[in-house]
Amino acid sequence: MQIKVMTNILEKNDQVAAALQERFEKAGIFVINLLGSPGCGKTSLLEKTIKALKETLSIAVIEGDLFTAKDAERIEQHGVPVVQINTGGGCHLDANMIQGVLDCLDLGELDIIVIENVGNLVCPAEFNIGEDCKVTVLSITEGDDKPLKYPLIFKQASAVILNKVDLLPYTNFDLKAAEKDITAIHPEVTLLPVSCQTGEGLEAWFNWLMKQVQIKKGKESK
Amino acid sequence: MHEMSIAQGILDIVLKTAAEHNAVKISCIKLLIGQMTQVEPESLKFGFAALAANTIADGAVVDITIIPLVGKCNSCGQQFTVERYSFLCPLCHSANILVVSGRELAVDYLEVE
Ligand SMILES: Nc1nc2c(ncn2[C@@H]2O[C@H](COP(=O)(O)OP(=O)(O)OP(=O)(O)O)[C@@H](O)[C@H]2O)c(=O)[nH]1
Ligand SMILES: [Mg+2]
Ligand SMILES: [Zn+2]
Ligand SMILES: [Zn+2]
C-alpha cells in the first residue's frame, strides 16, 4: 500500500521556532541568529557590539558551542546576561535547545538577544531557532570562494559581515568578487565589510542593528 | 553530522504515519530534497538505516529525488533554472525572484505492508 505523506521533515523544529518567535514578538525583543565558520570572528563582533551599545540597548547573548564555555566567559566579562548551550558535538543549534534555556533570561528586560550559533557554514542555515534574522560573518582569511560553495547561509542572511578586512593586503581575497557573488545569491542583502581588530566599518554595523531594533519596537507599539 | 537530526525527523514522520494506517512494515520511503539544501543523500541514508534498526522501518529503501533550483521573476514572469546560485532574472536582470523549487526537505510518500 502506498501512503501519501508530503510532510516537511523540519516541521517539528519549525513549530518550536514559531512558538519562540511569538514569545520574542510579545516581549518586543529583536533576535539575531549569528552564523559563520569557526574563528570568523562572531564572538569578537559581539564583544565590540556590546561595548559600543550596552548603554543604549539591553543586550543578552546565547552562546552555542560544541563542548566549552570559552565564548560565554568572554561575553560575561562585558557584564551582560549570557547563557551557554553545549551541543555535545552537535553541529548546529535547534529550536528545542533555545526553548530549553529561555527561562534563564529575563525577557521583560531585553531589547535584543544575539544567539551565536556553532561555528559552521553548513547546517545552521537549515534550522530556524525563532530569530528575526540571520547574520552571517565571513572572514577574509576563509577565501572569496565560500559564498558559492555555501550559498544557503548567504541566501538566508539579512546581513553579511565581511570581517578581518585589515588582513586584505596579506591575502588574495577579492572583495569585489565576493561582494558580487553574495549579491547574486541574495540581491537584497546588506553587506558590511568590517574589522573587529581596527574597528573599521563597525559603525555601519551598529547603525544597521539599531535600525532593526527600532523597526521591531515600532511594530510592537502599534 | 546534521544528517542524523534530519534522519530522526524522517523516522518520526514515517513511524507516526505508518501507525495511523496500522502498517506492520515500511518497505520504501520516498523523499524530496531540494538542490539548495544542506543534505548529503548518502549520509542521510546511512544515518536513517542506523536509526531505523529495530523499528518497522528497518531495512526500508530510502529513495531520494533531488529537486532542481528554479526561480520565477516577479518583474517579467520568466521561470528559469538558477545557475551558479545567481538569483537574477536572465531575461530582465530583475533581482525580485521567487524561489519556486529547490528548498524542499520532505517525505513524499511511503510504501507499507
Ligand atoms: N586580524 C583580525 N583578527 C580578527 C578579527 N576579528 C577576529 N579576529 C581574531 O580571530 C580569532 C577568532 O575570533 P573569534 O571571535 O573567537 O571567532 P568565532 O567566530 O567566535 O569563533 P568560534 O566561536 O570558535 O566559531 C581571534 O583570534 C580574534 O582575535 C579581525 O577583524 N581582524
Ligand atoms: Mg565564538
Ligand atoms: Zn548541524
Ligand atoms: Zn525578469
Image (cartoon, coloured by chain):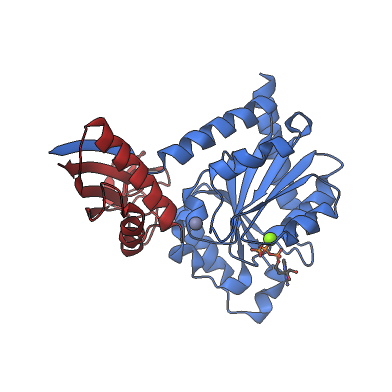
Residue A104's spot in the image, x, y percent?
73, 39
Q: Residue at x 80, y 38 (%)?
A: A58
- In which quadrant is the N terminus of chain A drawn? top left
Q: Where in the figure is residue A183, as x and y percent of width and height?
A: 50, 55
Residue B90 can be seen in this image: no
In the image, is residue A125 above or below residue A148?
Answer: above
Q: Position of residue A138 (x, y in %)?
A: 60, 63
Q: Pick the quarter of the image with the C terminus of chain A.
A: top right
B28 over A29 or under it: above or below = below
Q: Any idea which chain is the blue one in this picture?
A: A
* B61 on left or right of A218: left
Percent position of residue A137, x then y: 61, 59
Instruction: Count all numbered tags in the image, as a single digit.
Output: 0
Q: Which residue appears farthest toward the front when viewing the image?
A: B54
Any part of residue A48 in sight: yes
**Residue for point 55% across, 30% down:** A19
Say left or right for B16 vs B25: right
Q: On screen, B100 above or below A170?
A: above
What is the drawing colour of chain B?
A: red
Q: Residue furthest left?
A: A1
Residue A66 occupies quadrant: bottom right
Name the residue: 66% across, 74% down: A168
Q: Nearer the viewer, residue A187 or A60?
A: A60
Residue extending farthest to the top is A222
| Front one among B73 and A198 | A198
Query: Would you identify the image quadrant in which residue B49 lies?
Result: bottom left
Residue at 52% x, 46% y is: A188
Q: Quadrant of residue A119?
A: bottom right
